[in-house]
Amino acid sequence: MTPPVRAAAAGRRSGRMRGLWTAALAAASLALALPAGGAEPERDRLVVSISEPVVRITSTFSGASLVVFGVAEVAGADTAPDAAPPDIVVTVRGPQASYVAWRKSRVAGLWVNSDSRTFLDVPAFLSVQSNRPVEDMASPEVLRTEQIGLSRNVLLQRVGPDFADVVPTDSFRQAFLRIQGSEDLYEENPRGVTFLAPRVFRTEFDIPGRAPIGRYDVSVKLLRNGQVTAQSTEHFEIIKSGFEQNIAIFSQNDALLYGIAVAIGSLIIGFIGNFLFRRE
């Protein structure tokens, strides 16, 4: 699993706030531009904006908070001012990775690993935000087909010679979700989406310091009458910057020189350590 990286640079706060205000203004402008009254759209639509399309991390990075703003353009009579807001589900999926979950058993008075299950190419980060519990939005069949909700996201496993996503009550699956949740990598918040206006919504999610670098997909779905009527997908990137990124680029572009430099550096550190701590 990806090793944790620590504390965010304070100098990024002003840039992040500017990004939030920019996204908020863009969402408000879009809301004003949407058709009203007699100009009914032909179908439901979503317009989505992310506060930070690129998150840069250094050795002092401890996490980041990102905001998703959106406008739901609802067709038909539901655009009336007194109409109930639609249901919104925002799902953030991080880079794919493989994990092994172990089961311990007591053997001769000792707890040892006795069985395992491999999870293949599952999201390293998974966050589900909604304006109310997803079970109240649609039928179990729709939720399962659309992968709405933490327990309904497909987590492919190797089960003996086969590959499948087993039932939600599987002990290995539950243990994996519990472990990822304890590390703040998996979460579900049934009150995470709030409406700023009848058709304007926002949600905020936290990226922990241990989250891996790579591309994160943000899927936003609009549900009405128990069906998904519109969806939109955006993404953001988590990348290294500064000295760490220069070292990573050097190791990839000049692997031989990087290996020689690491070996020489190890020898120098070993020599210095031996000189400082040797016994007379």
Image: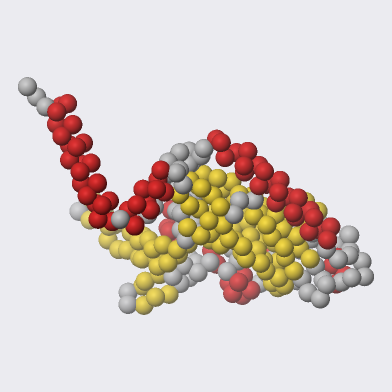
Q: Looking at this view, is 90 or 9 the one in front?
A: 9
**Residue 14, relative to residue 156: is it above or below?**
above
Q: Looking at this view, is 154 or 251 the one in front?
A: 251
Residue at 51% over, 39% down: 8
Say whether residue 139 is visible: yes
Residue 256 in the image: state x and y as whole percent. Answer: 25, 55
Q: How many marks?
A: 0
**Residue 7, relative to residue 26: is it above or below?**
above
Q: Classify residue 262 as left or right of residue 226.
A: left
Residue projecting furthest to the bottom:
162
Residue projecting furthest to the right:
38
Q: Classify residue 122 as left or right of residue 203.
A: left
Residue projecting furthest to the left:
280
Residue 221 in the image: state x and y as whole percent. Answer: 67, 66
**Residue 87, relative to residue 209: is it above or below?**
below
Q: Looking at this view, is 33 or 78 the one in front?
A: 33
Residue at 87% over, 71% down: 40
Residue at 48% over, 52% down: 239
Which quadrant would residue 217 be assigned to in this image? bottom right
Say whether residue 195 is visible: no
